[in-house]
Image (spheres, coloured by chain):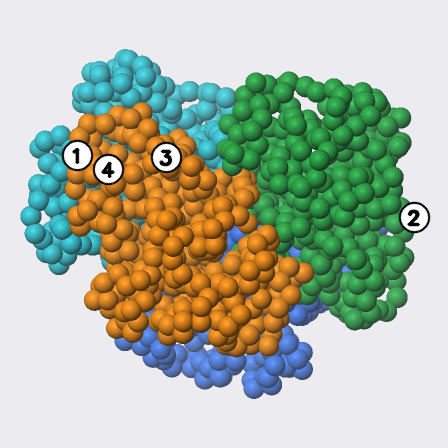
Chain colours: A green, B cyan, C blue, D orange
Amino acid sequence: MIKAAVVGGSGYIGGELARLLSRHPMISLEAITSRQLAGKMVSDTHPYLREYVDLEFSGSITGEGMDVIFLATPHGASMQLVPDLVRSGAKVIDLSGDYRLKDPKVYQEWYGHEHTDPHNLKRAVYGLSELYWQQVSDSDFVSNPGCYPTCAILGLAPLFVEGLVKEGVAVDAKSGTSGAGMELTRATHHPNCGASVNPYKVGRHRHAPEIAQTLGHLQGRPADVVFVPHLIPVVRGMLCTMYLKLNEDIDKKRLMGIYAEFFRGKRFVRLTDVPSMQAVVGSNHCEVGLEVLGNRNVVIMSAIDNLVKGGAGQAIQNCNAMFGWPEETGLDFPGLGV
Amino acid sequence: MIKAAVVGGSGYIGGELARLLSRHPMISLEAITSRQLAGKMVSDTHPYLREYVDLEFSGSITGEGMDVIFLATPHGASMQLVPDLVRSGAKVIDLSGDYRLKDPKVYQEWYGHEHTDPHNLKRAVYGLSELYWQQVSDSDFVSNPGCYPTCAILGLAPLFVEGLVKEGVAVDAKSGTSGAGMELTRATHHPNCGASVNPYKVGRHRHAPEIAQTLGHLQGRPADVVFVPHLIPVVRGMLCTMYLKLNEDIDKKRLMGIYAEFFRGKRFVRLTDVPSMQAVVGSNHCEVGLEVLGNRNVVIMSAIDNLVKGGAGQAIQNCNAMFGWPEETGLDFPGLGV
Amino acid sequence: MIKAAVVGGSGYIGGELARLLSRHPMISLEAITSRQLAGKMVSDTHPYLREYVDLEFSGSITGEGMDVIFLATPHGASMQLVPDLVRSGAKVIDLSGDYRLKDPKVYQEWYGHEHTDPHNLKRAVYGLSELYWQQVSDSDFVSNPGCYPTCAILGLAPLFVEGLVKEGVAVDAKSGTSGAGMELTRATHHPNCGASVNPYKVGRHRHAPEIAQTLGHLQGRPADVVFVPHLIPVVRGMLCTMYLKLNEDIDKKRLMGIYAEFFRGKRFVRLTDVPSMQAVVGSNHCEVGLEVLGNRNVVIMSAIDNLVKGGAGQAIQNCNAMFGWPEETGLDFPGLGV
Amino acid sequence: MIKAAVVGGSGYIGGELARLLSRHPMISLEAITSRQLAGKMVSDTHPYLREYVDLEFSGSITGEGMDVIFLATPHGASMQLVPDLVRSGAKVIDLSGDYRLKDPKVYQEWYGHEHTDPHNLKRAVYGLSELYWQQVSDSDFVSNPGCYPTCAILGLAPLFVEGLVKEGVAVDAKSGTSGAGMELTRATHHPNCGASVNPYKVGRHRHAPEIAQTLGHLQGRPADVVFVPHLIPVVRGMLCTMYLKLNEDIDKKRLMGIYAEFFRGKRFVRLTDVPSMQAVVGSNHCEVGLEVLGNRNVVIMSAIDNLVKGGAGQAIQNCNAMFGWPEETGLDFPGLGV
């Protein structure tokens, strides 16, 4: 058993990490930090963890004696902590947005402040292990993708890798409200969102440049991405519906063949006709489906649990890669289904 | 056309008053106040009122030149305003909790501060006009009932008036989240309430003594009331399921006869088999149904729109009584149904 | 008061027509038909209409003595009834899909059977009165648009009329489940749809050619439309998010100016920053907003109540045009807002 | 590894059994039957089980070669199968209502047909293992409790065992719609239940006599139970709020002490202040809380996942008892929490 710590464990992603790690056969969860809740029982904040996580929140940790550290801290905070933690010798997986955008200028533009750790930014591996398993395996510092980018890129990667996309792509994303985090906001006040579907940050969401960066990297030229996130009256789950034109005629059968080949052996990507949130909620699975319509139009759909494959589960999948274990270690269970 | 003002118009009840008053054939809405939003357009805060309410928020009003004033202010604030407003000659309808509990000591116990206007507290008429139409008609100052008491008491009144209740009553109330108001709270954060039903303030909700006061008054002796409110993942609508034992054998047919007689001519109470939230949402109607089971057990169910019959609509119904109009004036429309 | 009948009044759209007509100041609702429910009270099927619609279902009507007839019958049934009803001298508004697709071959392709009334198909006016007010006013037979086309086209019309769209448009539509009708289906079984967002009939929905037909007509050349409807866990309300590229550089301010000019004087289209389902639910209003992003990408959003502006309300708006009344007659009320 | 079969695996409970059994460390799932789906892949019906349950539906099984058989068949069907299956030597756990009501006359009264297997009815053990662990352990045939009785009885058992209940109890139950099963019904049509809370079968639900039977058994005299189930717009989860009067003065602290003592060592019952559906959904846990109010009134609340502790999970817990394993075997994971 290796030793793990979660830094910033008071939020939904922190709780989800603790929930999943508590059942992981190779990892012992040794510490969870929260500056505000130091000294309080983790299970007071996350009551569902009673009898599963018998820890008090620590105020902070150094990395000493830990084999892996998961950072569930807000952006801005992560880059204050990463330099020391990486130096401590522990492997580090950061779930914030701090190390996702490789260009410090782009980071500053979208996050509103300078990047203070360009050294580690450069060496961070983008932890979408279906694309970058080898790089993640070889790394000691991984930047875990955002929930929207995970869902969108898994649906789009084969098309961009094959260079089949004519111009750009429109990503219409629908997310459960847990993705917005634990902080009280107008947008997540039930009377505002409980009987409605609400677009937000249209063209201004930080996951837009993250999606564009990876898709651009995959196709070898800048990607033209339009991204509109919506909150739906669901707590867990995410669906992306994506629209693009092919640059040549391909029928559905051939396209599905390309997808099947691309994701061969990837335990957590499931090709299907119409992806279902319910089939993946509670699990680390991603469902992907597509339709080819007239005029070379393609619709791609993908679904994940935003807190699992879109966050804590993917971080553990990356950890599995970093320690040389099968990717499904500790994550080998189906979605709730209903 | 008489002239009306709404004091404290930034919240859900204030918006609902403005929405309904904008269509009332006898009332001209002249002013809406909000200290924080003074000078801003009402339709910036309540966008659905664009082209219906063409007013800026006022900082305050005196009552001069107004025929009726609706107070949608928080408890504590209302009793600071009422003395002057009543003196101004306008009729006043207070939608806060300040004038509902007739005993200042009980008020202090449940609201946590002294009542500073015992004079008007004494003369306030409890505006449940299905029970107190004449008193409301004769009054110039009405205290509008809480949403839960409205729903519960309309379902229970015939039994208590007839003295048929053996011991006490348990009121299990389920409310849409708009009843909790516009303020951001843990309880109304979507991830906490959007896929769950959550009891809250068990035995400690301020509407408990309000229900007990009226039921006790109706039966001529103190009423033993247990009240448990729950938030359900619905924005608008309320259902109360209520449990009691009769002190004599009565079958369902006879009991329905008592209810029919009691509510004869009451436009907004509809007797039915199983009340439906959907049948009343968007309207001022209340549906009431019941079952008589073995061992003299009775289950009574009642449903309202918490913002209409449970708030703004009932206040306008009271206003109609105070001005001698038919009770349905400006409220004569069915629920959405679906 | 003119005399109106609703044919096929047992479903959601039939009930909604009855609900709205019961409050219309110029129309007396004289009959509602349902073959299966003939002789039963309308308010047994639609309990929220008790005391508002005091009618039994008729088995059928001829049109004699009626001034206007609303057909809320299924496609296929409408075209059996329309020829006789039109001959009776009553004005007719058909809410089914039978007279929306102008080309009988296209109709047959999408609806799976031959069109048996090509004569009336040719003369039917497409009742999107924001675009075709004059034609509707001059007509005695109107085909009421589908809910999705209403929402999508209102958001897109100015761009297509001005010829600003480079290639095609992707319409990502999210609908409340009432749009799927009263029939029990797997798709609307709560455990399947109550905690999920589900795309359906991807590229195969009958509203796709309807949208393409009108947009093509507006821009004077065939329109390349991709349409993906989704069911969201909401009962009422619809939002369309639409993606396209402009064929020239236009900034948001100028584009909003084009929209403002286009919809000037149109009572039911409201331009806004981010459209809100809640602001329009319960009303005949449509909210439209847009963003201009890089690479000439535009996102347009539009929201309606699928049963009102997307069905019964729009039919009444068309009726108002046909009788020379202001478009808001009987429809002049705001959405619920919350 | 023992060998298990699920009979009647096409519904939600069948799928849930397969989901949980696929991860059970001591059980190998060998067969799932469905007469209608024989020969089709289980994962076509339950897509979330792809790669977890690699079986075709069988048309039927005999019990030969099986160690344990779970019957997820409808009531009426189970009692046709049980006699032969029990004779086969396999242990049998029936999840239908056929063997829950011990008196064949009461069964006939509530289920509408005669009981055809009184022999096994008599020897069936009621599988609420928190109460009857020893009897379940010693048995080869267990009748798994209904979802509502599980939730209600776990909340009430300590009070009834101690003889503290004055008269009767009112059980107000709120269930997610998955409890209603896979069959399409008016009650579970989303437009009817997706924005509402609907009471149903008031005083006529088959779980009422089941609750009364066990509570009566626990207190040694007939129990006066009023039971009203409600559907809430949630897919998974159940909350019961229960109302009764004590026959002596007991404060909350002492009562909580009684509960703590009663449930000592019971892994799946968690005492808490206010039970949370979210804390238990996805798990086999039950949360119980209570408040003592004036006039000896007590409110007890309990929450479970209706498909896990209310069905498939509890059946596996019973299986664990029957095979002498720790009760949490294969069920040792926390709820989703959010």
Residue assigned mark 1: D247
Which amino acid type corresponds to the residue marked 1 in the rendered image?
Answer: Asn
Which amino acid type corresponds to the residue marked 4 in the rendered image?
Answer: Glu
The quarter of the picture where the C terminus of chain B appears is bottom left
Residue B259, given in percent of the width and then of the height, sits at 15, 51
Helix, strand or loop status at disc 2 = loop
Q: Badge 2: few (under 14), some or many (20 or more) residues near its Cα, within 10 Å? A: few
Q: Are marks 2 and 4 on the same chain?
A: no
Helix, strand or loop status at disc 4 = loop
Q: CA distance from mark 1 to mark 2?
A: 78 Å
Mark 1 touching mark 4, by CB under 8 A? no
Residue assigned mark 2: A221
Residue assigned mark 3: D289
Which amino acid type corresponds to the residue marked 2 in the rendered image?
Answer: Arg
Q: Are marks 3 and 2 on the same chain?
A: no
The answer to which of marks 1 and 3 sits earlier in the sequence is: 1
Residue nearest the viewer, comparing D29 with B20: D29
Q: How many marks?
A: 4
Q: Are marks 1 and 3 on the same chain?
A: yes
Residue C202, given in percent of the width and then of the height, sits at 67, 65
Q: CA distance from mark 2 to mark 4?
A: 74 Å
- Report the mark closest to the observer, 1 or 4: 4
B332 with respect to A263 (left or right) = left
Q: CA distance from mark 1 to mark 3?
A: 20 Å
Q: CA distance from mark 4 to mark 3?
A: 17 Å
Q: CA distance from mark 3 to mark 2?
A: 59 Å
Query: Please, which residue is most extreme toward the right here?
Result: A220
Q: Are marks 1 and 4 on the same chain?
A: yes
Q: CA distance from mark 1 to mark 4?
A: 11 Å
Residue assigned mark 4: D162
Residue B119, label in figure: none
